[in-house]
Amino acid sequence: MEILVCVKQVPGTTEVEVDPVTGVLKRDGVASKMNPYDLYAVELGLRLAEATGGRLRALSMGPPQAKAVLLETAAMGAESGVLVSDRRLGGADVLATGYTLSQAVRTLGKVDLILCGKQTTDGDTAQVGAEMAEFLGLPHANNVQSVEPDGEGYVKVRIDLDSHISVQRLPLPCVLCIDSEVNTPRLPSYRRKKSLPPDCVKTISLDDFGDREPAHYGLTGSPTQVERIFPPEKNSEKEMLHGSGEDMAKELAAILRCRKLI
Amino acid sequence: MAYLKIHPEKITPQAAQELVGLCPFSAIQYENGRLEINAGCKMCRMCVRKGPAGAITYEEDPAPAHEIDKSAWRGVAVFAELRDGDVHPVTLELLGKARELSAVTGHPVLSVLIGSGVEEQAETILRYGADRVYLYDDLLFRNFLMDPYAGAFEDFVEKVKPSSILVGATNMGRSLAPRVAAHFRTGLTADCTVLEMRENTDLVQIRPAFGGNIMAQIINPAHRPQFCTVRYKIFSAPAPVEHPTGTVERMPLPETCRHSRMELLEVLEKPRQTDISEAQVIVAVGRGVKSQDDLALARQLADAVGGQLACTRPLVEAGWFDVKHQIGLSGRTVNAKLIITLGVSGSVQFAAGMRGCGCIVAVNKDPAAPIFDIAHYGLAEDWYTVVPAFLRALGRGEGQ
């Protein structure tokens, strides 16, 4: 099977602050990492590729340094990676990102199965996979816990629908967003990393797409617009307790008892 | 198309350094005397607003912006989800919010209900405030399958043209909403925590963003419908009325629903688990817990206050808890009467999942931790000191 996994580089930490006076976002030069939810999709993709004698390729979108996550995916066992990197894609919302990825997928030749992680830790929307699928005209499923190809052009998938599990049969090609904790992702292999061919990660841009109209991408191609960003509201009723740990604990117990909360 | 323009004549080495430091996404690079913006740019325009005047400007082509006739789109619609045959409580919460939003524009509150043999459920939706329920009732919809459901949802949007659509951020909602939103090439904002309506029918959507302690206010100014998802327990359900005045409109089965690419093989029960989103009292632990063994002390506190133990994302990533115990945007939303947080810093991601709690107690030795901004009672002290003392104050000695 020709399998493609979509991965994203995210900030190494989620501790970002806004200076309430200047409104400036402060993100200290923290290291970036692969979105942890993508690791399960990569692992699942590698197992499926091994079981079916196929191959796994990886796709990402981001700045040039996002090449690192594709190299990591390759070090885990993927054959190669493609990075979509273009300044004109900046400011893309869910729709524009889904569209960009769908255009990138169309440059990759035959793909039987596209895997995504459940969500990212920086955007947390869990919606790009489904939108990409709609743009590709492919069926999709979210919260997928297991995938079994039947060798006849279909996959049997288990979908977590909160109150129950739905077992469905989807035709290939399709897009599956893999739940977290469905497997134990392997670690990247140092030896494999050292032996990777230098050209195993390719960078493409808008110029490589079928649709090269810049207005369909980035901020302009995004229906949603961020009007402003601001620090969250503070609680005005807050009460800080004072004294030693012992005193504060006693006072808290008294307050909670008085409010009949315990 | 909109883009950022660098004005080289204004780029002194000093200005360049300032701009590089200003960009929250490290998307501005300065090398060999040349300033460049790379693909990491999220167009937040911080460099335009806060950088040296005129060094980087935001340019928009005079090309006509996407124009639509907003008056052709009327109504605040709620996608009605069923859970085990009943109307999902998140749907009732959204109906309450839809009523508030529609009061601004005078639009009706609408609902789309897709199911099989669900007339009674349509009545429930009317009692919770819908002016009109569009009912897609057919055996085809007995179980959730994406293609028939998306087909009915799309049919509803095409025929009714609602201005805004609110969908519960359940596993089903988070799969269906993006599918339908992309079909209409329109915007979708996930996991909104605040919704407000403008008189021009623009829906103001506020959500935590960029993975950090930041809220983003988002609008969808030139596309309709405006899609958003909202998690369970973010809003409150209204009181039902005895004699609703709304009506149910039965919709014919759209032809597109008959062709499903996916096929249902089996429905499996999930083992019942205690769900923290239903808990009345919660003790939540964060990275201030130094080792897995120390969870015993937190568990002792949870037992003493009759609560359940929950955690932040790092502890799930550390493998100490399963994700079902995680509070926050990537975990559960809780609405407990009392939550006691121990060694939790209080990122927006976490806060978004618990700020609806009635009484928030925060214990953290860092007095500057953001958790104190949302706490009702703050104890700036090590939880390893406070918890044993608290247990003693309750007459439960440590280690008993």
Image (cartoon, helix red, strand yellow):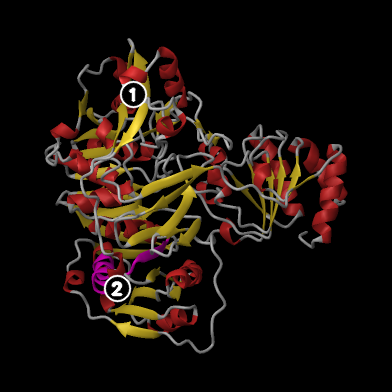
| x and y, in percent, of residue B129 in the image | 48, 78
Q: Which residues are magenta?
A: B149-169
User: What residue sits right under mark 2 in the picture?
Assistant: B141
Q: Is residue B32 visible?
A: yes
Q: Is residue B396 visible?
A: no
Tags 2 and 1 both on a single chain:
no
Q: Would you identify the image quadrant in which residue A123 lies?
A: top left
Q: Residue at x 55, y 52 (%)?
A: B353
> Which of the pair B223/B132 is nearer the observer?
B223
Q: Give the answer, above or below, for where B96 lies relative to A161.
A: below
Residue A85 sits inside the magenta stretch: no
- The quadrant the N terminus of chain B occupies is top left
User: What residue sits right under mark 1 in the picture?
Assistant: A65
Q: State the residue lying farthest toward the bottom.
A: B243
Q: Say how many tags the image has.
A: 2
The secondary structure type at the circle numbered 2 is: helix
